[in-house]
Image (cartoon, helix red, strand yellow):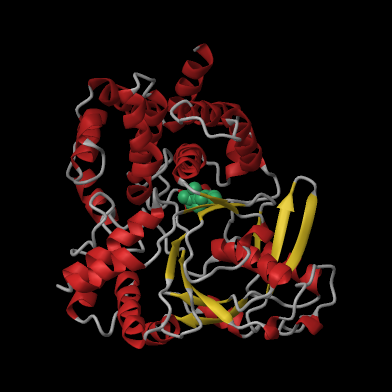
Amino acid sequence: MTAARLTQLTDLTGPATRPAYDPQAHGAGIVHLGIGAFHRAHQAAMTDDALAAEGGDWRIIGVSLRSKEIAENLNAQNGLYTLIERGASGTSARVIAAIDHVIAADAEATLAALCEPAIRIVTLTVTEKGYGIDHASRLPDQTNPVIAADLAAPDTPQGVLGLLVAAIRRRRADGSVPLTFLSCDNLPENGAFLRDGVVGFARALQDDALADWIAATIAFPSSMVDRITPASTDATLAEARHQTGCTDLAAIETEPFTQWVIEDHFPSGRPNWEAGGALFAADVTPYERMKLTMLNGSHSMLAYAGFLSGRSFVRDVMTDPDLSALVKRHLGAAAGLLSPLPGVDFDDYAAALADRFANPAIAHETFQIATDGTQKLTQRIFQPALSAMEAGQDLRPFAFATAMWMRFCIGHLDDGTEYALRDPRADEVMAMIRQTEQTAPALSEGFHKLAHLIPDALAGNPLWRGHIEDVLSVALADGCHAAIRQEALRTMQQ
Ligand code: CS2
């Protein structure tokens, strides 16, 4: 029998925890761009805690930039959804009421929401590629078709930067409170990254006065976000039905761990996110670096190596002794490059990460993490490799991760099974591979020549190149299992 759809808190019959506040008593104060699973497991949950602890008009208007499905599912449920936490000690669930409504792939309605005077904060999880900002220069990427279109027609923007700048212009003209922009993507100095992109967009519009005003007036705090959140499956929806007694098509599942470190710079106010466990810090950079290089760096490495050796989920990687030894080696190498962070023990952090990756209740696909390598590897692998080079430390763990990514880009497993390369630069990468002799030195050279990707200082380092060719040649000649085995043995002998 199908259960009735979740639409009101009074519909709930299962054990899930209910929100400790009346959602209707609170207006919206935040627009969130990119309302995927991560936002719903992380920021929306902490906003729910803040609403329960302190009230305020801080509910969230979500924007789904591309998919209509999530907007339809959430709107049909008045924004309510079940957040399931799966950990070693069992499963629990809560119903989140922080989302007011969701705008589906509608730029005009999004701009209107951004201009509502009650909105004070815009938060973003649009992925590394979603900003249209060149990662090296931090300026708008004018070769990106959405950026180019928005620069040509700035009053009817479709993309992230165009929408933000149009909203700033209108609000400034209307005398509304300035917005605070809070990026929650896995990018280094994400606040400064977004600020440079937004200011650069205003300059590209030849509006220097606006660009100067934004730089002087608007707050772009940086933040480090962390919660491992796989895509929902049928098992998620079945658990939500058990937990709520209702059909919930927007349910998601996540791990018990959650972390949010934010720079406290919100001139127009903010929710009491501390109530959900957020930590406010004067400088988020050391936390970001720790998370990007340790968690995300080892995640990317294990995603490529794991997927290539037939491990579909991160938890399966961690039960393989060779791969889990390589994860631990990577965590140690990344930790060895960090400056001390008061109150944080990097060995404890590494051990906690290994436990989180091993969580048997979370089915996090290696293929999902393997997407968008060209957008992720700079901050996760290449920058730490550069630091290791400068510090005279071992380059091998970072070279191994890079070689596994190169092998992954070839697009088939050792047994010939093909898969799609999901990456904004996929066409360019695949064309390079097709035109290259299929040997480790030739392929490595091709990857190192891709523009704006692997830093020149690494490309010109014979030690780095030697490590990459070594791993890649074994993977090509003897298969990925052999390359992983060789690497694990090497690690154990050290
Ligand atoms: C992952 C991240 O998909 C990926 O690239 O590394 O999404 C990771 O799960 C989160 O950053 C954890 O907070």
Q: Residue furthest left?
A: 206
Q: Is 344 on the left or on the right of 453, as rendered?
A: right
Residue occupying the point 62% across, 85% down: 76
The quadrant in which residue 60 appears is bottom right
Number of numbered discs visible in the structure rendering: 0
Nearer the observer, 271 or 437 = 271
- In the rendered image, the quadrant that contains the N terminus is bottom right
Above or below residue 1? Residue 321 is: above
- Does the rendering let one see residue 132? no
Residue occupying the point 60% across, 83% down: 27
Q: Position of residue 308 (x, y in %)?
A: 46, 40
Above or below residue 50? Residue 482 is: above
Q: Position of residue 117 (x, y in %)?
A: 46, 85
- Does the rendering let one see residue 462? yes
Q: Position of residue 164 (x, y in %)?
A: 35, 74
Q: Position of residue 442 (x, y in %)?
A: 20, 32
Above or below residue 180? Residue 26 is: below
Q: Is 332 on the left or on the right of 249, as rendered?
A: left
Nearer the observer, 239 or 458 = 458
Above or below residue 299? Residue 190 is: below
Residue occupying the point 81% across, 78% down: 12
Residue occupying the point 34% across, 63% down: 131
Q: Is 318 on the left or on the right of 425, as rendered?
A: right
